[in-house]
Amino acid sequence: MTKDDYLIRAQTVCKRMCCGQATLALWVKQGKFPQPVRVRPNRAWRSSQVDRHIATLADMEIAQLK
């Protein structure tokens, strides 16, 4: 983890992804979203992984428009 990379909790991830926590949990279970890091008793994600996932989704959306 670099100094620009930090951990974010599910609530912040949901705001970035425009989804609810139940949807986020389902995406993780289905392998459609990166696995969280366990920070007892919570779970968190590396900001770089979330940003990379969002960029990938944007690239896929752009490719579909072509």
Image (spheres, rainbow, N blue to C red):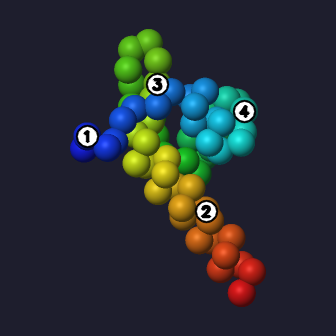
Q: Which residue is mark 3?
A: 43
Q: Residues within 10 Å of mark 4 (few under 14, many from 20)?
A: few
Query: Which numbered disc, 1 or 4, marks the residue that appears first in the sequence?
Result: 1
Q: Which residue is mark 2?
A: 57
Q: CA distance from mark 1 to mark 4?
A: 28 Å
Q: Position of residue 4 (x, y in %)?
A: 31, 43
Locate the C terminus by quadrant: bottom right
Query: Which numbered disc, 1 or 3, marks the residue that appears first in the sequence?
Result: 1
Query: Relative to 22, does residue 18 appear above or below in the rendering?
Result: below
Q: Position of residue 3 (x, y in %)?
A: 25, 40
The answer to whether residue 48 is seen in the rendering is yes
State which quadrant residue 15 falls in: top right
Query: Which numbered disc, 4 or 2, marks the residue that appears first in the sequence?
Result: 4
Q: Amino acid at mark 2?
A: Leu
Q: Position of residue 34 (x, y in %)?
A: 48, 46
Outermost top residue: 41
Q: Amino acid at mark 3?
A: Arg
